Image (cartoon, helix red, strand yellow):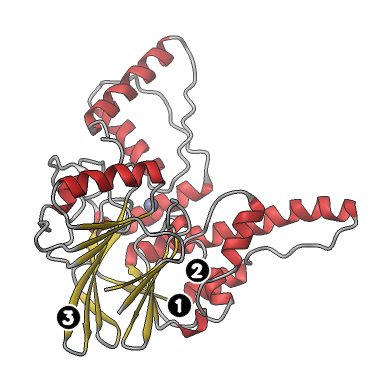
């Protein structure tokens, strides 16, 4: 039983974690590495394993740093299932097509310059056809239902409260006499966020791959955020100004529009029109409408570390911190060690661990 951290290791984007067990390979996430064009191209074009040899891919949520390199994976020979919640499948249909469109436009711009310089033309990382091919591999699963993804490997998706459809995944692994419960947090949502349910901790796992973005700071409570929004809007509206809010992440725009409507209803902000200037955001809102099963019903306070509430240090023997810059992850590692968790690793890219 082996884990290799092929991407999203010691950095935030490009998540890819490879589980090898019983002679089979299961990939967790296939995110796009986002950075300088040349470095990003290099990383996104080359996989640390043979895509055609994978048995299954599990996807925690639709954000591009987790899903965005799936078209490349399929273009390089992967033909197996990509398991994700139904809402994630819906969002990926928009986001992977949108990502392919952006790749194609970006390369047009690059080629304009290359043509002028008499240099050979470049190909996009992937095309819209590649994205369509990847979408055909998706298999929608429900929360809280176990599904066999490879011989001896059962996966259960639990709500991560991060964006619509987001999940943490529990893998129940059997290898000969050995049984191991491996948790993968995906991105962990904040409690009390509009629309979404609170994150559901992964219970009783023996080892955990845990995201560590913002592991070095405590978020301010969501109520303070609403208060800050009220203040900014009232001040600007009183002065006759316009408010432009850059909300680029899918999920963020919907949360903002929802929050604004709540503030209108409560009479806390003046009744001013909202314009959403993004076709992707408008389409994503439609996916939200189609998946009310993901909406929250209750709200209660829970901090990032409470995610581990059901995993006391004597049971959870290993934690792997991924998806975080060093300052973020190392602060979280210190806290976890001080709380008595025996082994907390911060894997380097490509590093392999035996479980
Ligand atoms: Zn995310």
Number of numbered discs on residues: 3
Q: Residue at 66% x, 54% y: name it.
A: 38
Determine contact: label 1, label 3, CB under 8 Å.
no
- The nearer-to-camera label among 2 and 3 is 3
Quadrant housing residue 142? bottom left
Instruction: Name the quadrant of the C terminus.
Output: bottom left
Question: Crowding near pointer 2: few (<14 within 10 Å), some, many (20+)?
Answer: many
Distance (Cα) linking label 1 and label 2:
10 Å
Nearest to the observer: residue 131 or residue 70? 70
Local SS, label 3: strand
Could you say which disc has been placed on residue 190 in the image? none
Foreground label between 1 and 3: 3
Residue drawn at x 38%, y 47% is 251
Q: Residue tagged by mark 3?
A: 179
Residue 209, how many percent across, how many down? 29, 61
Mark 1 vs 3, N-terminal side: 1
Q: Where is mark 2, residue-wise?
A: 70
Residue that badge 1 annotates: 137
What kind of element bears circle 2? helix
In the rendered image of this protein, does residue 154 appear above or below residue 188?
below
Q: For the residues marked 1 and 3, what is the alpha-carbon distance in whole angstroms?
A: 29 Å
| Mark 1–mark 2 CB contact (< 8 Å) | yes
């Amino acid at each position: 039983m082996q884990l290799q951290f092929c991407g999203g290791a010691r950095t935030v984007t490009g998540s890819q974690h490879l589980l090898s067990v019983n002679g089979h390979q299961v990939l967790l996430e296939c995110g796009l590495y986002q950075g300088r064009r040349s470095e990003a191209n290099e990383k996104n074009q080359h996989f640390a394993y043979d895509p055609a040899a994978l048995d299954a891919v599990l996807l925690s949520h639709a954000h591009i740093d987790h899903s965005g390199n799936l078209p490349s994976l399929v273009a390089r020979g992967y033909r197996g299932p990509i398991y994700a919640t139904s809402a994630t499948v819906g969002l990926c249909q928009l986001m992977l097509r949108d990502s392919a469109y952006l790749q194609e436009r970006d390369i047009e711009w690059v080629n304009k310059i290359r043509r002028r310089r008499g240099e050979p033309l470049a190909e996009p990382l992937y095309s819209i056809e590649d994205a369509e091919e990847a979408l055909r591999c998706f298999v929608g699963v429900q929360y809280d239902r176990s599904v066999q993804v490879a011989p001896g490997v059962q996966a259960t998706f639990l709500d991560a409260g991060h964006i619509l459809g987001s999940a943490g995944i529990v893998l129940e692994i059997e290898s000969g006499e050995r049984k191991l419960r491996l948790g993968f947090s995906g991105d962990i949502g904040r409690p009390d966020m509009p629309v979404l349910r609170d994150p559901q901790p992964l219970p009783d796992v023996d080892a955990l791959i845990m995201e560590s973005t913002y592991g070095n700071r405590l978020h301010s409570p969501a109520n303070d955020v609403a208060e800050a929004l009220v203040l900014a809007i009232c001040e600007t509206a009183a002065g006759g100004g316009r408010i432009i809010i850059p909300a680029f992440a899918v999920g963020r725009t919907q949360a903002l529009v929802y929050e604004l409507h709540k503030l209108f209803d409560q009479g806390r902000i003046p009744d001013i029109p909202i314009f959403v200037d993004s076709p992707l955001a408008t389409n994503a809102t439609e996916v939200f409408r189609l998946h009310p099963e993901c909406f929250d019903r209750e709200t209660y306070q829970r901090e990032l570390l409470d995610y581990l509430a059901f995993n006391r240090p004597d049971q959870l023997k290993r934690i792997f911190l991924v998806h975080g810059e060093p300052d973020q992850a190392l602060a979280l590692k210190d806290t976890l060690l001080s709380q008595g968790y025996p082994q907390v690793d911060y894997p380097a890219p490509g590093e392999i661990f035996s479980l």
